[in-house]
Structure formats: C-alpha cells, structure tokens
Image: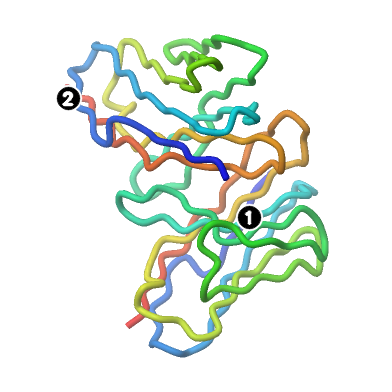
Amino acid sequence: EAQVTQNPRYLITVTGKKLTVTCSQNMNHEYMSWYRQDPGLGLRQIYYSMNVEVTDKGDVPEGYKVSRKEKRNFPLILESPSPNQTSLYFCASRAWGGFGTEAFFGQGTRLTVV
Amino acid sequence: GENVEQHPSTLSVQEGDSAVIKCTYSDSASNYFPWYKQELGKRPQLIIDIRSNVGEKKDQRIAVTLNKTAKHFSLHITETQPEDSAVYFCAASGTGNQFYFGTGTSLTVIP
C-alpha cells in the first residue's frame, strides 16, 4: 500500500530537549516536505527536499532542521524545542512533475512543548 | 513567493444545498491548483485538482473552476451531505513545485 508514515503520532516534551520526528514514504517520490498546521494559519511549509541531499527552507524554517540521506526518509529535527513549536506537523511526499502532482500526507504528529 | 488567500474561513450550509469556497493567488506562474479535504483528526487528502490549461473540472458533486486572468479559483460542492463536513484547503503550485496553501475553510453541513 502506498503510504507516508510519520512517527510518533503524539509527543509531549520539555523545552530544550532535542527531538526527531521521522517520515518515510514507499512511493519512490522525489519531493518531500514538512508542514505545520496551526488554527487560522493553514498549512505552512517548514522545509522541503527535491531529492537526496537537496533540502531548502520553506516559509517557517526557524528552529527546525532536516536531512535527506535516503530517498524514502525525511526526518524533522528540533534541536531545542520551544513552546511556540507546539503544533500539528505533517510530512508529505510527491512525485516530481512539471505540471503539478498529488501530495500524499502522513498521519500527522501532534507535538506539545511545555 | 506565492500568496494564497481563501474565503470564507467558516461555512455552514443545509444538507442538500451547495457550498462554494474561493481562493485567490498572486503568482501568475502558478499552474497547478489542488484542493484538499481534511476530516477531523485525519490527514489532508486530495479531492480534486485543476491545471492552468483547463478552465473547469468536475467529479460527481465536486467541481473546480479557474480564472487565470483574475487569478482566482473556486471549489463547488453540490447536494451537500453531512460527510462533506471537514476543513478544505486550496493550494497553488508553479515553478519550483512548492505548494502554497490557503488558510482553510471549515465546512459544516447541517442535517
């Protein structure tokens, strides 16, 4: 089954404690991205990657890191989480297409930073 | 970069009525406009999309229209049903392939 898998689904952590949210896709998609979803603000892109070893900042990258060492995995790293990073996070993947292709989303990770 | 605005932010309709959600975009190079539906506690999922070489697309009760000159596109849902209740997001994508999402519309269909 084609899917994007995120882990964990829920996470409560304390300020400053490094954490990683994993994302894996089995569709051989080139393009992967991370979004955060906050009430009234929609889905805002944090980072994206067009292929292995190629990453770039989205609209809200401050406080986040990513890596793309393998095509299927795109982890999101919060090195020193702060309460303003409490949010719902989604990973998504897409095939690379000149005219736009469907994005497939993971199940979401609800992060609370206290 | 691209700026996508979406209206209204909330919408309530009676079951069987139609619902219309509108989005505008700023970058004339955008050429792909998907719509995603997010049910409560679930992930966003694509329901319909349109490319800039087409003015309208329909899939059963759902249709999307695109006006490239005015830079706006709309989602139309006819004969609404309670299971249509969800948050709907529009998005625009162009050169660079990034998606820029609207802020979402919470649709409630009242039985």
Tag 1, which chain?
A: A
Q: Position of residue A87 (x, y in %)?
A: 39, 65
Amino acid type assigned to the residue bearing label 1 in the image: Ser
Q: Position of residue A110 (x, y in %)?
A: 41, 65
**Snapshot quadrant of residue A51:** bottom right
- Residue at the image point whose x is 64% and y is 19% from the top: B52
Tag 2, which chain?
A: B
User: Quick one: SS at disc 2?
Assistant: strand
**Snapshot quadrant of residue A7:** bottom right
Residue count near mark 1 (Cα–Cα under 10 Å), binned few <14, some 14–19, many ≥20: many
Residue at the spot of label 1 = A33
Q: Which mark is residue B87?
A: none
User: Quick one: SS at disc 1?
Assistant: strand
Q: Is residue B52 above or below residue A31?
A: above
Question: In which quadrant of the rendered image does the C terminus of chain B lie?
Answer: top left
Residue at the spot of label 2 = B110
- Residue at the image point whose x is 46% and y is 33% from the top: B90
Depth check, front residue: B84 or A102: A102
Amino acid type assigned to the residue bearing label 2 in the image: Ile
Question: In which quadrant of the rendered image does the N terminus of chain B lie?
Answer: top right
- Residue at the image point whose x is 55% and y is 17% from the top: B68
Depth check, front residue: B3 or B93: B3
Q: Position of residue B48 (x, y in %)?
A: 53, 24
